[in-house]
Amino acid sequence: MRPGLLRTLAAIPLLLLAFEGAVGGEEPSTADVLKELMKRIDTLEEQNKDLRNKLEKSGEAENPDEQLRRQVQELQDRLNAIEKNREPHLPAAIEDKDVEPAPAAGTREDGSFSDYMDGKVVEPSKKPGVVAKKPDAGGEPPKADAPTKAPTEFVVGKQKKMSGEWNNGLQFRSEDDAFSLHVGGRVDFDNVWYQPTAKNMRFGSDNATRLADGSSFRRMRLRTDGRLYDWVDFVFEVNFANLQDFSNQSAAATTVGAVGITDSNLTFREIPVLGNVRVGHFLAPISLEHMTSSNFVYYMERSPQFDAFVNRFDYVNGINFFNTYLHDRVTLSSALFRSGSTTINPFGAGAGDGEYAFAIRSTGLPIYEDGGRKLIHLGMTVMERTLDNHSSSPGDRALVRAGATKTDLPNVMQTGTFYSPYGEYYLNPEIAMILGRFSLSGEYLWSFAPSAYTGMTANSVLSGPVGRLDYHGFYVESGYFLTRGDYRRYNKKQGSWDRTVPLENAWCMRGPDGKLSTGRGAVQLLARFSYLDLVSGDPVLTAKAGARAGVENDVTLGVAWYINPQANMQVNYVHTQINSVLRSASGSFDGLGLRFHYDF
């Protein structure tokens, strides 16, 4: 017989005798326990010997060790039954056996964080996630007339000690999650090439600008975000993509580019009725592709309709209310903010009497299955905004880009400036779906100005009426993962796309044994069709030189390789057809883009 099994078997009767004596009110003596123990061991060894003899003779007898295991299990079951009968009386807060275990300390019953602040004393029996400690199973139950020890209180915000880990970036958290800190950033290094375009095509604001090959850092941001005392989230992010490359400056005097602010705000969490409230510099709540982080987009550039209308107020100053409902199947977000782009300078300052905008976006998931591997997303945004100085000039750029100035990134279509004293309105329905490795999404954007003019004097006298302006566009994009098990991820809290996490990361290196080791990553094929119509007004509103108003059609084909959740490579080929109101300026061009992305 195995020695370990024999010791286990010997220990169980000893415990059984001790418990039986305690339950019956009689304490067995040590001599009695040892006597009984030796007697049982002798009996089992005899049984073991007989079983082995039978096994040798017949070759069909049951494994004696297996029989001993069953005997051990029978003794263990008996021990459990005796121990159950000795279960001590539990405090009233948890003695009901039908009550589910309390959530982790510092959380509410619905799993969300509590709003208990540092130093606030809360009765443990009333505070979610806090219960009195259960006595040890073998301990004596408290006497009826003896005072019980006060349960240990756990106040969110008291635990300020933080530990760090790598979780898609450097993350620090306290044990109760009341404090957290992430320090990181993102970089997009883009390289583009264009097929020589026809001489008649006009770009930018004159007739001399052409699309040129190049490379640039499309984004170069540093970011810090976290949580303070469980109730306040913060984020501060700056963009350095416009800074000068000092080691390669070509002029004697180097001009340092502006450092632009992107996200910089405070969010007050889980306020009754209101939900979450964000104040500061943030993304206006409009459009699926706009609300999706640039870390998670599948194409090098968002659609032409985004560039012509949404990108003009990408980040805004204001207040944002948002919340989720029905187990995160429905989202609702609204915001009041300063409108326009010229009143929001790189340092977040905004000015302009009466220049405000309002937006409300709601999304729903009528189908959500298999952890997001099968879903249908529906959404709608309605927005109204007052224009900067009552004026606007929609235009869009090529869908692969390299550069920072208007000369590097000229418009391929533009309407020219119009004036609208009654502002501009937007309607933006959206739909998306995921079916395993395949994903599909699309949006339509309709924008109109009730009454537009081509001129306005310093005294706000309008001239040159063109009437109502209506512009619209849409896109339909799809993606398919060639690698089995990978799928597009979705963020239920925001109603947007989320980070792509490969089932297997990619690598190629030699191990300590000198052998080559590789991983595949996730590989995805992409296809998108986009359409933008910037022809409207009577007469048609268009620029007088360079790119004109027109209708644009784009076909984008691409492949993306996700090396790991934080690094990827993208290749986009774009064919663009422009049908300009100036017929001689119509034509097409092709662009090829290569991006290296990482974030941390």
Image (spheres, helix red, strand yellow):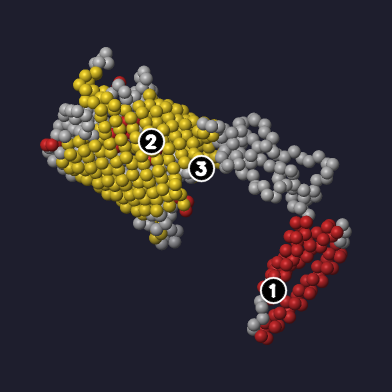
Residue 551 appears left or right of 288: left
Q: Residue at x 61, y 33 (%)?
A: 116
| Location of mark 1 (residue) | 67
| Image spot of residue 226 (x, y percent) | 50, 35
Judge whether 111 appears above or below 204 on screen: below
Using the rendered view, name the quadrant where residue 403 is placed.
top left
Q: Residues within 10 Å of mark 1 (few under 14, many from 20)?
A: some
CB contact under 8 Å: marks 2 and 1: no
Which comes sooner in the sequence, label 3 or label 1? 1
Identify which residue, 308 or 40, lies in the foreground.
308
- Secondary element at tag 2: strand
Q: Residue at x 71, y 83 (%)?
A: 53
* Quadrant of the rendering where the C terminus is positioned: top left
Which comes sooner in the sequence, label 2 or label 1? 1
Which comes sooner in the sequence, label 2 or label 3? 3
Query: Tag 3: residue type?
Result: Leu
For the image, the number of numbered tags is: 3
Mark 2 to mark 3: distance in Å?
Answer: 20 Å
| Location of mark 3 (residue) | 326
Is residue 288 something that shows in the picture?
yes
CB contact under 8 Å: marks 3 and 1: no
Task: Kindly report which numbered mark, 3 or 1, lies closer to the viewer in this rendering.
Answer: 3
Is residue 153 something that shows in the picture?
no
